[in-house]
Image (tube, rainbow, N blue to C red):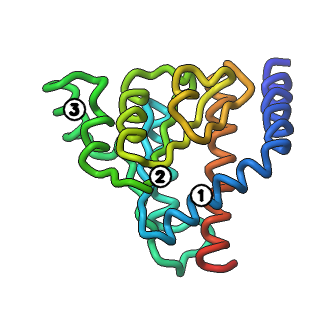
Amino acid sequence: MYIHNEIQEAIRIKQQLLSQAQYIEQVAQILIHAFRQGNKLLIFGNGGSAADAQHWAAEFSGSFYNRKRASLPAIALTANSSEVTAIGNDFGFEYIFQKPLSALANPGDVVMGISTSGNSKNVLLALETAVKKQCITIGFTGKTGGKMLDLCQYCFCIDSTDVARIQEGHELIAHLLCARVEQELFGK
């Protein structure tokens, strides 16, 4: 019964994403425009969301479906463990994304913050910096959006409080965004 119920909940969440198809397309167009303008994508989150940030950056910078396309400038701020631990140790964990973002982000860059609660202090601080630097801010979060809702121009709030279901919703949206960017910039 447990497994059946979990699958049913995953299906419910994906069904709800159907109503966001146009919004997902709108955000894909934002990314397409940014890449065409020579801007980059900066992604970050904690724990499983850190793994998602690295996964998504790899798909944009490497390839998704199209193995012959050019690389796109996408950086996961979670990937450099020396940087993350040095900043955490020397300045505090809340600065692990803010400090590299402040050095790397330029106006027009796209900044994606991932937090299933929407309240991770280090994600919020980095998003505040992105707003000040005139970046385009996109959030991936859970049901309420948390505090990051106010810091994001675009925000995907998955209708759940279950971290696993939220992350599964995020993953589908990220794959759709990457696929649309590839189609538009490089063809099918």
Q: What x and y, as percent, mark residue 67? A: 55, 76
Can you say whether 158 is above or below 120 in the image?
A: below
Q: Image point 42% across, 60% down: which residue?
A: 40
Label 2 neighbourhood size at 10 Å, few (<14), some (14-19), many (20+)? many
Label 1 neighbourhood size at 10 Å, few (<14), some (14-19), many (20+)? some
23 left or right, relative to 100 = right
Q: Image point 67% across, 19% down: which residue?
A: 161
Label 3 neighbourhood size at 10 Å, few (<14), some (14-19), many (20+)? some
**Kind of residue at badge 1:** Ile
Of the numbered discs 1 and 2, the one sitting upstream in the chain is: 1
Q: Residue furthest left?
A: 90
Circle 1 residue: 30
Circle 3 residue: 85
Which quadrant would the C terminus be assigned to in this image? bottom right
Q: What x and y, as percent, mark residue 55? A: 49, 50
120 left or right, relative to 28 = left
Q: Nearer the viewer, mark 3 or mark 2?
A: 2
Q: Quarter of the image holding residue 18? A: top right
Near-viewer residue (92 or 38):
38
Can you say whether 114 is above or below 56 in the image?
A: above
Near-viewer residue (116 or 145):
145
Q: What x and y, as percent, mark residue 95? A: 27, 29
**Kind of residue at badge 2:** Val
Disc on res. 118: none
